[in-house]
Image (cartoon, rainbow, N blue to C red):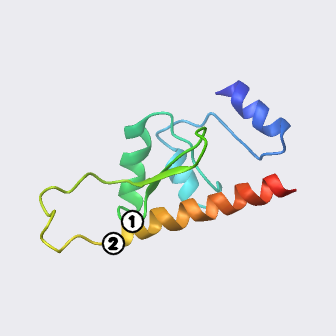
């Protein structure tokens, strides 16, 4: 992680870390970070879902496109019953659109 943080800093990104997983989300919730990168699925999802289950999303970078998804399972127990909420899907779409616009703006400069 340290070489990646140093490389990000060299590109002008205000990156910090590594930060211990047992405290990084508490620090992030206080507003100190714009984003938190988790190296493992459960390391990030457990804390993130605890803070805001419906609005937590996953973004995948490094592909030819940004991939986003909701941070919950398939909800087979409620599928087809007309009771599923849309907040997670809307948030996932909103966040990926925001990041795509930022990346597009960066490439236009």
Please tell me which residue lies in front, 49 or 95: 95
Q: How many marks?
A: 2
Q: Pinpoint residue 99: horizontal percent, then vertical percent.
A: 63, 58
Residue 86, located in which quarter of the rendered image?
bottom left
Mark 1 secondary-structure assignment: helix
Q: Pinpoint residue 97: horizontal percent, then vertical percent.
A: 58, 64
As drawn, which residue projects farthest toward the right?
Answer: 109
The quadrant in which the N terminus is found is top right
Please tell me which residue lies in front, 104 or 30: 104
Q: Pinpoint residue 46: horizontal percent, then vertical percent.
A: 36, 47
- The residue lying at 64 percent from left, 58 percent from top is 100
Is residue 4 positioned above or below 9 on the image? above
Q: Residues within 10 Å of mark 2 (few under 14, many from 20)?
A: few
Going by the image, does 79 lie left or right of 18? left
Mark 2–mark 1 Cα distance, whole angstroms, equals 5 Å
Mark 2 secondary-structure assignment: loop
- The residue lying at 64 percent from left, 56 percent from top is 34
Residue 103, located in which quarter of the rendered image?
bottom right
Going by the image, does 5 lie left or right of 41? right
Mark number for residue 105? none
Q: Pinpoint residue 78: horizontal percent, then vertical percent.
A: 14, 64
Is there a contact, CB below 8 Å, between mark 2 and mark 1?
yes
Q: Residues within 10 Å of mark 1 (few under 14, many from 20)?
A: some
Please tell me which residue lies in front, 10 or 70: 70
Residue that badge 1 annotates: 89
As drawn, which residue projects farthest toward the top?
Answer: 3
Is residue 81 positioned above or below 96 on the image? below
Mark number for residue 86? 2
The quadrant in which the C terminus is found is bottom right
- The residue lying at 40 percent from left, 49 percent from top is 47
């Amino acid at each position: 992680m340290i070489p990646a943080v140093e490389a990000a800093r060299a590109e002008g990104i205000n990156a910090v870390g590594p930060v211990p997983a047992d405290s990084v989300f508490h620090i992030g919730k206080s507003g100190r970070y714009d984003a938190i990168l988790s190296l493992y699925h459960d390391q990030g999802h457990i804390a993130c879902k605890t803070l805001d289950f419906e609005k937590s999303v996953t973004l995948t970078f490094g592909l030819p496109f940004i991939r986003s998804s909701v941070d919950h399972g398939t909800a087979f127990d409620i599928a087809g019953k007309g009771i599923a909420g849309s907040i997670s899907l809307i948030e996932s779409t909103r966040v990926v659109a925001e990041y795509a616009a930022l990346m597009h703006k960066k490439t236009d400069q």
